[in-house]
Amino acid sequence: MSATVITLNKGRDAHLVRLLEGLARGAPPASCIVVEIGDAAPLPAPPLPVERIPFPRAGLPLAAARNAGRRAARTDTLIFLDVDCIPSAGLVAGLSRAVAEHDGLICCEIGYLPAGAVADGWSEADLGRLGHPHPVRAFPPAGVVTPAPQPGLFWSLAFAVRAATYDRLGGFDETFSGYGAEDTDLAFRAAAAGVPILFLGGPRAYHQHHPGYDPPLQHFRDIVSNAGRFHARHGIWPMDGWLDGFARLGLIAADWREGIVVRRDPTLDEMAAARLPDDRPF
């Protein structure tokens, strides 16, 4: 079963180059589709077939851009990989085998890298030594596929799915605008349709460090809008930790669980204060 890797890029060309390097070190996919949100800068000659899809939209239209990548794919297996991830050599083959055997949304483990961990001449052994596993998501031993404890633990930065299943689910819902909850919505809709969220042990992706914020005030309006949309559909609030953080700052009313009321937008000083130190992997 051949696979297409789909990634989104908006100005993270150095990350993209390393993603492609990682793909070339293992059994490569049939192709890699790069959905370019904004201007596409020239890249070095890629080490495998790459198709760059122009997608000139403002902001981060994640749901719509991922769907555009799927429309360009021509294989039975889709592997979605965020541009800041470096795949291990066995990732494409491992996810492809898992998708052939299991009809679900299949996630792999992520190793979060500290700042400065990836340089020219990087090795997978170094990434494996430096990558921090996520504390909330426990993955099984190599080669084992297990159900996720609950759909909210699905993450879209590295997962695989059968193209036919993705189409049956309708892909990502493009009414989720910009950043936040579009992936959790896909997982909840999949679970309701009998498509499980699965964790694959063994192959990993390594998340390249970039500035992070807690709460992510740079996405304030998107998160508020998408949280309300998710709640209206599923009856629960997603991203509740971030919404609590917004309430503590006085950006939304403290009783936001009764319905989000925006008080004001974050200031530039508040955004700067929310930035995580570079030694925090997540």
Image (cartoon, helix red, strand yellow):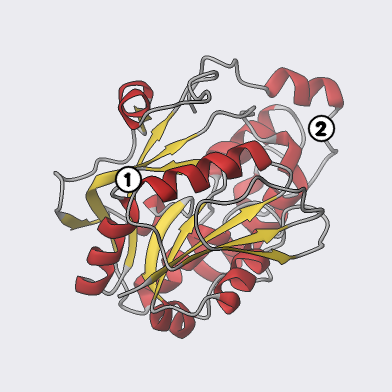
User: Is 59 placed left or right of 107 in the picture?
Assistant: right
Looking at marks 1 and 2 on the same chain, the residue that comes earlier in the sequence is marked by 1
Instruction: Kindly identify which numbered label has been placed on residue 266.
Output: 2
User: Is 135 placed left or right of 73 in the picture?
Assistant: left
Q: Position of residue 252 (x, y in %)?
A: 74, 40
The three-letter code of the residue at mark 1 reads: Ala
Question: Which of the 4 image quarters holds residue 277?
Answer: top right
The three-letter code of the residue at mark 2 reads: Pro
Q: Under tag 2, what secondary structure?
A: loop
Q: Residue at x 58, y 16 (%)?
A: 278
Give the number of marks. Answer: 2
Instruction: Kindly identify which numbered label has been placed on residue 17.
Output: none
Q: Residue at x 62, y 55 (%)?
A: 8
Q: Is residue 146 above or below residue 210?
A: below
In the image shown, does 57 or 182 lie closer to the viewer? 57
Image quarter (top left, top right, bottom left or bottom right) of the N terminus? bottom left
Closer to us: mark 1 or mark 2? 1
Question: Which of the 4 image quarters holds residue 72?
Answer: bottom right
Q: Which residue is mark 1?
A: 89
Q: Is residue 71 visible?
A: yes
Q: Is residue 235 visible?
A: no
User: Is 264 placed left or right of 159 in the picture?
Assistant: right
Q: Position of residue 162 (x, y in %)?
A: 37, 75
Q: Residue at x 25, y 40 (%)?
A: 138
Disc 2 residue crowd, few under 14, some 14–19, many 20+, Cα 10 Å: some
Q: Is residue 124 above or below residue 150?
A: above
Q: Is residue 243 above or below residue 274?
A: below
Q: Under tag 1, what secondary structure?
A: loop
